Amino acid sequence: MKPYRVVERIMKGCANHRRVEIMNLLSRNADLPLFEIAGRLKINFKTASEHLRRLFLAGLVNKHNKGSLVCHSLTNQGKNILKFLRTLE
């Protein structure tokens, strides 16, 4: 079992409907830049940025450079958490 604070950070990372929506989008479309995520979900750029920051800190999303863009994709842990969240539907 992971230390309780690590589990808490992961759970807080995905404890928002927008963050779950972002994770779902990234499961279907890897390597998306921030502006595309915000556009597809029709949310404010700053809001999307903050949600992605929290997902990154929780270890659920990776960031990597693709030219001049910073692209996002789910980590393996993010994929597992999303799979778990889908069982709750």
Image (spheres, rainbow, N blue to C red):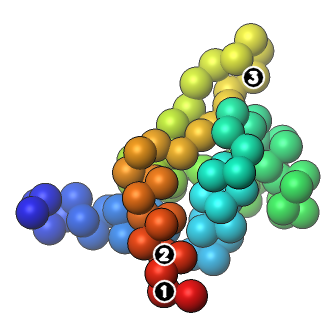
Residue depicted at x 46% and y 43%: 75
Residue 72, position in %: x, y?
63, 37
Task: Give the residue number, with chain letter if any, for mark 3.
Answer: 69
The secondary element bearing badge 3 is classed as strand
* Residues at circles 1 and 3 in contact by the CB criterion of under 8 Å: no
Viewer can see residue 83: yes
Q: CA distance from mark 1 to mark 2?
A: 5 Å
Residue depicted at x 48% and y 66%: 83
Q: Which mark is residue 85?
A: 2
Q: Is residue 11 left or right of residue 67?
A: left
Q: Which quadrant holds the C terminus?
A: bottom right
Q: Residues within 10 Å of mark 3 (few under 14, many from 20)?
A: some
Q: Nearer the viewer, residue 51 or 27?
A: 27
Q: Farthest residue in the bottom direction?
A: 89
Q: Is residue 61 left or right of residue 84?
A: right
Residue depicted at x 69% and y 33%: 31
In the displayed structure, would residue 62 be above or below residue 64? below
Viewer can see residue 12: no
The secondary element bearing badge 2 is classed as helix
Q: Which mark is residue 88?
A: 1
Q: Which quadrant holds the N terminus?
A: bottom left
Amino acid type, residue under disc 3 in the picture: Leu
Amino acid type, residue under disc 2 in the picture: Leu
In the displayed structure, would residue 9 be above or below residue 65? below
Q: Residues within 10 Å of mark 1 (few under 14, many from 20)?
A: few
Amino acid type, residue under disc 1 in the picture: Leu
